[in-house]
Image (spheres, rainbow, N blue to C red):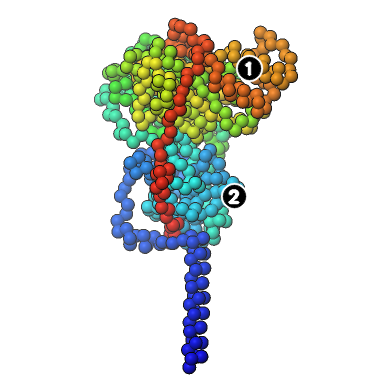
Amino acid sequence: MRILSKDLRLQDVTIMYFTALAALMVILVASYQAPSAVGVVELARSEPRPPPALLMPFRVLLDPLGELKLAWNVSYERQEVTMELKVARLKHGVVLGMSERGQLTRADLVVLWDSGSKSYFGDAWSDSEGHVTLDSQQDYELMEAKWTSEGFYLLFKRAFSTCDPRDYLIEEGTVHIIYGLLDQPLASLEQLNLSGIHMGLQRVLMLRPDTPPPTLPPDVQTLDVVAPDVVIPGQETTYWCFIHKLPENMAKNHIVMYESVVTAGNEAIVHHMEVFECSPDVSNVPDYSGSCDDKMKPGKLNSCRHVLAAWAMGAEAFYYPPDAGLPMGGPGSSRFLRLEVHYHNPLLISGRRDSSGIRLHYTPSLRRYDAGIMELGLVYTPIMAIPPQQHTFYLSGYCTSKCTRTALPQGGIFIFASQLHTHLAGRGVRTVLVRGGEEVEVVQEDQHFSTHYQTIRVLRKMTNVLPGDVLVTRCTYNTEDRLKPTVGGFGIMEEMCVNYVHYYPRTQLELCKSHVDLEHLQRYFSFISRFQGKDECVCGEDSVTARYSRLEWDTFSTQVLDSLYKTAPISMHCNQSTARLFPGDWDKQTLPAVTSVLRKPPYPCEVGARPTGRPAVGLV
């Protein structure tokens, strides 16, 4: 009996051991594949009411056909973004993601996919080769998923910062959105490689001011500056220019708001638009409607550089502060406006007609202040350059205390919006306010900047610039793909570093920019040439561009140039609206001493509170 009892106990122990082992294997496999699958029906039981309808003030078409629509809502109080994705024709899933510059590698992803019998929704990431892996920390919270008459609808949310190193930090500035559709089922998400499916890219400003727009005056009128029934060329990229004439002897008005007018059906092709005022010194600008790149276009179009309005895909209407308006018409203004429309037509659609443009809302009842636009940053000159094959190189332009003390009123000015600008090598732009030698406020910053997405950005908080303050605009560049130095200038392969700030009350100061002192730059050329064993003759006609090009670019010549830009005196362009300098000596100004004391406010993970991720959600 004892033997029998002992045998039974051994059997029991054996059965219990293998049962526990099998259960452990099931748990491990389930956690690797798609853990805690929760059916839609079960979700419905736990949530008797659907989520409340959310206002989605921001929206953009993602793909050229307009079949993927993204809308979102920003809560600064909860530090989260709620997103609504509509897919017109869903097959086996959809991928939406964010990456540093729109790459398919090292991207933060949210994926809806099916295995043939069941669908899943989850947070994922791509590695350096584009392979996709389900994230161990699920930070996208699914709120609703359903079929509608417009296609498939997803509602989900995510915190600005998840404290997950594989997740993208959502911050102010440009966000590069990548997207794609799945045509085949996936037995496992790990089967997916983004390089194997058709993916697209769209850029947006995800974080925007959450203040309600001001009310327009009752006597507001509208003026449409639109393309004249243009036939969009069947090529990927077109910049179309059109000259619009205001009525003769138009009285002074205030522009108080503007918005886009996009021809129905072309919402996915019209990429961005700008309206420029021509120089008042040019008495007549000839009619023109054609490519901005046409070498035969009238030369006077180049005088139309003063930005009045700028819109990019996904941008909402732009409102001026209640106390200010942008002057249009009246003495000292031009009656000629240049509209520039960028058509992005990757599908090479031909024969499509377009009359898109910008609608200006203006009032004859003048507000208390005229708004103005001031250029900050670097002068358009080859004196400033970026060496070749640089992963990161910085250039800074200064608006000095001497200039602001000379040109600004006692109470200063209030910056309420800005438009950042570089050319193709630009990667980031940052303007800071310096007072008493210390940084006190970031005016505008975009560390994911792209020259392909330039719009006027309203500040969440206006910046008060006082006489004696300094404004420093620093641009970040990447020239890894270039073998020659990139100099400053107007060409697209040359570079700029500009922040067009919108402010009030308007002053005579229209341009507050700098460049390194030319004499010190010439000393640099001579020093490096001697160091490199070159005995060259520097003639009067020898251009700065040529001297940059003749240098041998290595670590030493690059570091010395960087040091020169950070320590040498500067020449200031403290220009009035007449393009003349304010009285005074503006050459060989001492570089402003700036102490960097600003840092971004800490996100929760930086002070020890790590959000808890969620499991992937399975959808029946």
| The C terminus sits in image quarter | bottom left
Q: Label 2 crowding class (10 Å Cα cut-off): few <14, some 14-19, many 20+? A: few
Residue 607 spot, x, y in % from top left:
40, 43
Q: Residue furthest bottom?
A: 1
- In the depicted view, which residue is nearer to us: 578 or 139? 139
Discs 2, 1 touching: Cβ within 8 Å: no
Q: Residue, x 43% and y 38% (percent of image)?
A: 171
Q: Position of residue 594 (x, y in %)?
A: 46, 23
Residue displayed at 55% across by 17% down: 568
Q: CA distance from mark 2 to mark 1?
A: 50 Å
Q: 7 above or below 197?
A: below
**Rendered residue at 41%/41% (across/down):** 603
**Is 405 located above or below residue 231 in the figure?**
above
Which residue is nearer to you in this view: 290 or 601? Answer: 601
The residue under the point 40% across, 50% down is 611
Nearer to us of marks 2 and 1 is 1
Please name the residue that numbered disc 2 is placed on.
196
With respect to residue 346, does 567 lie above or below?
Answer: above
The answer, for residue 329, to whether it is visible in the render is no
SS at circle 1 = helix
Type of the residue with mark 2: Gly
Residue 524: mark: 1
- In percent of width and height, residue 372 lies at 38, 18
Sequence-wise first label, 2 or 1: 2
The answer to whether residue 531 is visible is yes
